[in-house]
Structure formats: C-alpha cells, structure tokens
Image (cartoon, rainbow, N blue to C red):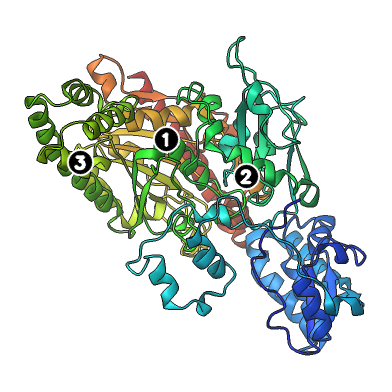
Amino acid sequence: APTYVSKYDLTEDLKEGGTFLLNCPWTVEELEQHLPGKMKRDLARKHANFYIIDAAKLAQQIGLGKRTNNILQGAFFALTKVIPMDLAIEDMKKNNYNSYFKKAGQKIVDLNDQAVDLGVSAAVKVEIPASWADAQDTPVVEPKGITPFVRDIVLPLDRQQGDKLPVSVFQKHGVLDGTWENGTSAFSKRGVAVKVPKWDGSKCIQCNRCSMCCPHAAIRPVLLTEEEKKSVPAGFETVPAKGLGKDSPYFFRMQVSPYDCLGCGVCLTACPAEGALTMTSFEDMKPEQTLFDEVAMNESYLKKDVINDKSVKNVQFAKPYFQFSAACAGCAETTYIKLLSQLFGDRMYIGNAAGCSSAISGGAPILPYCKDCQGHGPAWEHSLFEDNAEFAYGFFHAQDSIRKELLIRLEAIKAAGIAVEAVEAYENGWKKTETSRTVTDALIAALEQAEQTEDVKYVLENKEYLAKKSVWAVGGDGWAYDIGYGGIDHVMAQNRDVNLMVLDTEVYSNTGGQSSKSTPTSATAKFAAGGKRVAKKDLGAMLMQYGYVYVAQVAMGADQAQTLKALREAESYDGPSIVICYCPCLEQHIKAGMGTSQDEMKKAVECGYWHLYRYDPRRIAEGKNPFQLDSKEPDTSKVMDFLMGENRFASLKNNFPDKADALYAKEVEDVKARYAKYKKLAED
C-alpha cells in the first residue's frame, strides 16, 4: 500500500516532556507498523507522554457519526489539566447546550455530553519503546505525475511550512506575477476518511450514478480493452461492460481513490444496486490508490467513442476538469460543478462569485480545476458578490472581440488561397459544440503547415481563442438572489451567449448561515432566527418574463438525466441562460447527515418543495410551449415530513412553538402555490 508524503510534521513543535495525543484507528501494537520514523524519533528523544484514542470509532458507537470534536476536547482537558476537570466538564456541557439545543434539540445535546464523558477517560497511554529513538525514516512515495512546482511550493505550503520558503523559489518557478499551476489538488492526498466505498463488480449494474454524484470526483468508471487489461497493475479486476452494445469490446471497473475520498457515503445512497458499494476500512482500501492513480487518472484509457453528453452513463466516462476540492464531505455544490466541467471543461471561462463555490475552487495551494494532456482546461477567476455576472460578461466580450478579428484574418487567408478547406470547415463548424474542437484543431494543423503570412501568424498566435468558448458565471443564492441580482438581471437582459449556474443552498453558507431571499418560509437562519416570514423569491419565474432567457431548475438527486439535459440545453442555446441547482448543505442541518444529500433532493422534489422545469425559448419558434414541467405531480402531504427532516425547520418548533405551526402552514401553502403556477404555465 502506498504511503504518501505526510502533510504535516506533527511532532516538530513538541516540547521536551510534552504530551502528544494521536487520534488513530490503530492499537498500541500496530503503532510500530504505521508511525513514520521521524515521529517515532521525536516522541522517544523528546521523552513525550504519548497517548492514542480512536475518536472516530467512539463517535460511531454513541451515535454521533463522524463528529469527534467533544470526544477529543474531553481528552484534551483530561490530559493537559489546564483547568480543574470538574470546571472543564461543566463548561464543555454548557457549551453543548448553547451550541446544539436551538438547532438540533435536547437529544443532540445529550449525545455530545456523553461524548465529553467518554473522551475524558478514553485516551490510552503508550509506553514508547527505546528503539524508537533510532527509528529509520519511513519510505514514502510522491503522488504520480508530481511537478517541480508542486514539489517545491505546493507541498511545503500544504504542510503549513510556507513561511520557510524563500522568495527565490517563487522566482524560480515564475509565479511572482501571481500565476499558479492548476490541478494541484491531485497532489494533496489527504487520506482523511475512516471508511471508503469498495466496489463489487458482480453486483454493479454500471449505471455510473455513483460517479455522477460524488462531490470530489473520487470514484470513476473505467473502460479497458482486452489488450489494455494486460498493461494495468495487478488487482485492477474488471467485468464485461454493460449497456454499450452487444458487441462492445470493453471491460468495466468502478475505481475509488481512497486518499481523495472523504467517506461521505453519498455514492452509496445514490446507488440503486444493493451491495455494489460497501463502506470499507481505509486501511484495507489503501492499496487501491495505485489503481486509481495509474489507470483511472490516465487519459490514455479514456474512450472517445463512448463519451457523449446524451446520457448519465456515457458522460461519466469523460474527464472531470474539477476534482478533489476542499468542499465539505457530501457537498452538493461540487457535484454540479464537476458535471459542468465534464461537459464543457476543455473550453470553459468561469467567473465565480464569492462564497463556498469560490472558496473550494480557488483555495491556494490546492486548486481543483485542472487541464488535460493537451493543455486544455477551464479558465477560472474569482469575483465579488455584487459584480460576478458582469465579470463573466466581460469574459464573453473579450474572447468575442478577439475571435471577430480572427474571422476577418481567416477571410483574408482564404482569399489568398491558403488552407481554404480548413478555413471553410472552421467557419461552418466553430459555433457548434459538437464540432468546434475538431474543426479548430484541423485549422491549426493546416495553418502550421501553410505559408507563414502575417495573417497566418496572427491566427496561430491567438489560436486559443478559435474554439467556441463556454462562458459561465457560477455562485450561490447570496449572489444570485440578493447582492448580485441587479448584475444578473442586467447581463441576462443583453441577450448574449452567457450562462449562469446558481448553486442554491437557500442560505448564505460560506459567511455564517445568514438568511437570503432564497430562504423559504419558516426556515431558521441568522437574521431569521424566528423563522423566515416571507416566501422564497422565484428567481427562475422572474427571468422567464424576458422570453429570450433559457431558464432551468434542477436537482441532481431527484433526476440526474434532467440535470444533464438542462446543462446541455443551456450551453447550446445561443443566448443567455440560467440553471438553478438545488444544493443541500451543512447549514440546512439535515438530520440524516450530508451522506444523504442526494436523497434529500429527491424528497424535496417528490413532496413539491422543489420543482424541476426547463424554459427553452427555442420552442416558441417551433410553435410549442417553451415551459416544460419535468417533475411529477407532488405529494404535498409529505411536505411536513420533509421539513421536519431538517433542523433549520424543525428547530423552529423547539424555540418558537407559539409561531411555528402558522409558519409551517404558510410554507405548505407556498409550496402548493408554486406548483399550481408552474402547472398552469406547462398547460398554457
């Protein structure tokens, strides 16, 4: 099993005779095998008081899932004795009440109190062997494909040793102007999950739904030919591919990256085949990292004859240009961004509004946007709440102006009798998503072989602008519904080919959980502690009024195919588009946990809390209704069950019982009114 470069030198700052507590799944006897040599030497030579605790296992046992904070805090105070234990326990439990009662109720308070009591006595003392003082350094391997930039800059920063880097290192790698190598998240290899999914090929139906909804691109389908199977590492077991035609020459495997997986379990809840995925110990799954790195990440194994955007299954064989982000485990936002990158990533321009989506997309040194072996990939930049739509609009205008000049030059090149066929093919096909890259590559190849006139040189110098660009403004509901709405309205009104993706968590997720205009009636949030009193703003319905804006509302967990179709239609529409994506979030306090985020979307749609639709102006010219309601007739009797499954709603009953029922009733009426409005639109 690979052992990757340790992220942190955990014992470097340990003082002589200091206390060191290690949270790990190993017994005292297993430490010899697992601890790095440097750590053993430090613990022995500094005469440390060494303790271990398996907080993850204890949290599971008492019903706290992955929440280990109070167990470890209890252990901390028990070992350090910085304040009297009776006072420490009293204060910790008082803090539990203040932190959890209003949001989650007394049961969660009690569980956290139990965690405190458990943590106080759970640490196990380790007698450090004398041999550790002379322990040898543990052999480590670097992540596959590591670059000098990553080795010299990214890994030291990732280990929190950035203050030791001299300016000369940045000068050496040419980053003094602020440029940064992309795709660096592939080298982080955090390995933070206690359990990760294990694939069983005999039970898998090869639908690729698990890959579609993985927030971190840590589980991917792979197709191999019979010949390719001979060259992959031992252990890469496959089964005959299904659903690709009876004469398909391919073999299939769903491959997990143990070190990149966060163990959220979303893939299991989305999987329709019982037993195809099972959560397995990280230690047991570590050997599969090599299989992921050498096969699933190897672009030479991508099957271009299979990859297309027509089905969930086929699109998941495409490379994700957004991978291994620092998003929360189970995050719904990243599932949409990842899919967007698989569809259009090799030619995307992205303006990203401030918020969670920008924090997890551009958190140097770990950048999840990456490029392919041809050097193609998204051009990403972070902007502000108030001007992100305009910022992306600027992307559109910049590349559009350059291409207009290129088209003028190409006309001159054609008139001169140079590469005439390639120029004509480009002029006829560059605007079409399915042909743009092909005709662009053919044009570049033809011009590189042609006479190097001034016009030819100009086109080749600006060749990156030849392919059709997919321009997107991405952000959350704080941007789209609130602070940036004026800019969105302005950009959509221009009737230009700019696309918007709204990641709707119904609250300001990144800045502390404040209420937004997307927050629905009766939901609690900061600035709406007593429950939101007015209905959620209907952003989609407002923008439909223009008549020439493509508008869609999607929820991946409810209908993956509809999500795919909406993104495909939005991008292909030669005009403004907006896709509003439902995103369950930690700030919603889902009682079943973020591992069920995809299921939560499904419940929201089934009860009518959220609706799926597409408004396509192209249908007007065809004499058809532009509005299509994609979700079925909801069962509104289940709305209250849905609300009570999230503590943002349920906590209202605990804290404001006198007003809760009235607000709940209003939310149910809001749900019914929205559906009635959409149903009428679909019937007109």
Sequence order check, earlier mark of 2 and 1: 2
Residue 657 location (% of width, % of height): 61, 57
Left or right: 335 with respect to 99?
left
What amino acid does circle 2 point to?
Answer: Asp
Q: Is residue 599 left or right of residue 468?
A: right
Image-quadrant location for residue 453: top left
Relative to the observer, which residue lies in front, 378 or 414? 414
Asked if residue 255 is positioned above or below residue 48 in the image, the reply reads above
Seen at 68% across and 45% down, the residue is 290
**Residue 300 rendering spot, x and y as whole percentages:** 53, 33
Question: Residue at position x 90%, y 63% from top?
Answer: 27
User: Does the CB distance between marks 3 and 1 fall below 8 Å?
Assistant: no
* N-terminal label among 2 and 3: 2
* Amino acid type, callout 3: Ala
Question: Which mark is in front, 2 or 1?
Answer: 2
Please give the residue where the numbered disc 3 appears in the rendered image: 493
- Say which element carries label 2: helix
Determine the residue positioned at 87% across, 66% down.
32
Q: Which mark is residue 293?
A: 2
Mark 3: secondary structure: loop
Q: CA distance from mark 3 to mark 1?
A: 19 Å
Residue 541: where, in percent of width, then height? 33, 36
- Residue 382 position by quadrant: bottom left
Residue 553 numbered mark, or none? 1
Q: Nearer the viewer, residue 502 or 191?
A: 191
Which disc, if any, is residue 544?
none
Q: Judge whether residue 20 can be spotted in this image.
A: yes
Q: Is residue 131 left or right of residue 562?
A: right
